[in-house]
Amino acid sequence: MTRGKQMTIQKVKRSVSVFFLLLCTGCSEIPAVFRPASISAKVTSELIQTVFIISAIGFVVVESILLFTVFKYRSADNSKEIPPQIEGNRRLEIIWTTAVTVILAVIFIISLNPLWIISYPPASKSGASSTENLNIQVIGRQWYWEFDYLDYQVNTANELHIPVGVPVMFELVSADVIHSFWVPELSGKIDVIPGHTNRIWIQAEKPGIYEGQCAEFCGVEHAHMRMLVIAESKEQFEAWLLHQQTVPKADLTSDETEGELLFLSGSCSSCHSIKGTEADGTQGPDLTHFASRTTFAGGSFQNTPENISKWLKNPQEMKPGNQMPNLGLSDNDIRLLQAYLENLK
Ligand code: CUA
């Protein structure tokens, strides 16, 4: 065997092992798109897998022919002579044009049913509960998600509650730039565009907490624009919805009362709303039931007393570029505000 040949074989071996290594890095955890928990995510996941298998077969066939040709017809002993040139082969051209056309036509045909399912929710069953065909407006904002339960005067942020087994209709709009709504286990991506309403429907099949993420670069904190979708039984969901419609409890401790006064007199209330108070700002998330959420700031941080204190001390340090400025609050103000916010269950 010549030295050139040995080197070529070594190179091929190395490339093949790198390829399989890359394949195996994906084995540790199955990506969420392959763990669908809704009707539309299920058909999408199945379609991805079918198209992947078709593409993999195509890849293996084409690469095998390529490798076979390269090795079989390589020039002997590095000869500098140009081999006989061939131009055109009608039969071959017809074969590969037809093969590609047939493959693409098959992919098109098998995509039609999933597309149909994704586009149209199942017809609503008459006589069902009041939250049948729930309408939720999703507003993408730099950098958090606002959820408006249109028929229930409920407005929340970053944590979306939906009932299981019911088609939920979403209309998506943006308050600033283009975002993209994506909860891999529940739906495909859909752009959230200023001045244009997009629609999507989701029917969760299993209760659970599903993570979502903005999937379109939308500025410096794009990566911190997350959300949680909490899919729960109809009864749990209706209880949650009912609670969200209430105003937070009135009997506050003296610290909480001072915190509320601070909230209402300071700049907090010009950006945030709290039901039952004069705070009616719309720039930032509605905080009416802030303490009932597990995360804050675009789903980026756990809603713990330590994190709230840190946030109030300087929001720009935790999430640089966000719309909440450093208010220069004293440690005592932070303590009072935190006491008040933690009471907003
Ligand atoms: Cu919003 Cu990325």
Image (cartoon, grey):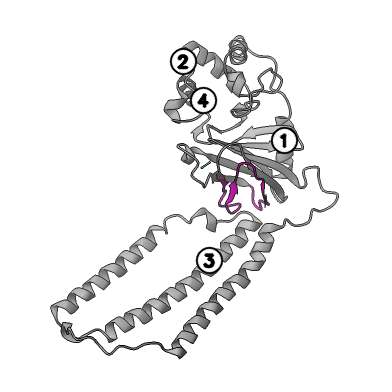
In the depicted structure, whether residue 82 falls above or below residue 289:
below
**Amino acid at the residue labelled 2:** Gly
Instruction: Give the prevailing secondary structure in the magenta stretch.
Output: loop
> In which image quadrant can residue 277 be found?
top right
| Among numbered discs 4 and 3, the one appearing first in the sequence | 3
Tell me how far mark 4 sits from mark 1, CA to CA: 28 Å
Q: Looking at the image, is mark 4 or mark 3 nearer the viewer?
A: 4
**Mark 4–mark 2 contact, CB under 8 Å?**
no
In the structure shown, which secondary structural element does the residue marked by tag 3 occupy?
Answer: helix
**Mark 2–mark 3 contact, CB under 8 Å?**
no
Res. 328 mark: 2
Q: Position of residue 157 (x, y in %)?
A: 61, 34
Q: Residues within 10 Å of mark 1 (few under 14, many from 20)?
A: some
Q: Looking at the rendering, in which quadrant would you find the C terminus?
A: top right
Question: Is 20 placed left or right of 76 in the picture?
Answer: right
Residue at the image point whose x is 45% and y is 37% from the top: 220
**Amino acid at the residue labelled 1:** Leu
Q: Which residue is mark 3?
A: 49
Question: Is 290 placed left or right of 61 in the picture?
Answer: right
Q: Nearer the viewer, residue 288 or 279?
A: 279
| Among numbered discs 2 and 1, the one appearing first in the sequence | 1
In the depicted structure, whether residue 265 falls above or below residue 240:
above
> In which image quadrant can residue 247 be found?
top right
In the structure shown, which secondary structural element does the residue marked by tag 2 occupy?
Answer: loop
Q: Position of residue 44 (x, y in %)?
A: 59, 61
Tell me how far mark 2 sits from mark 1, CA to CA: 36 Å
Q: Which residue is mark 4?
A: 324
Give the extent of the magenta segment.
Answer: 180-207
Residue at the image point whose x is 53% and y is 40% from the top: 226
| Among numbered discs 1 and 3, the one appearing first in the sequence | 3
| Among numbered discs 2 and 3, the one appearing first in the sequence | 3
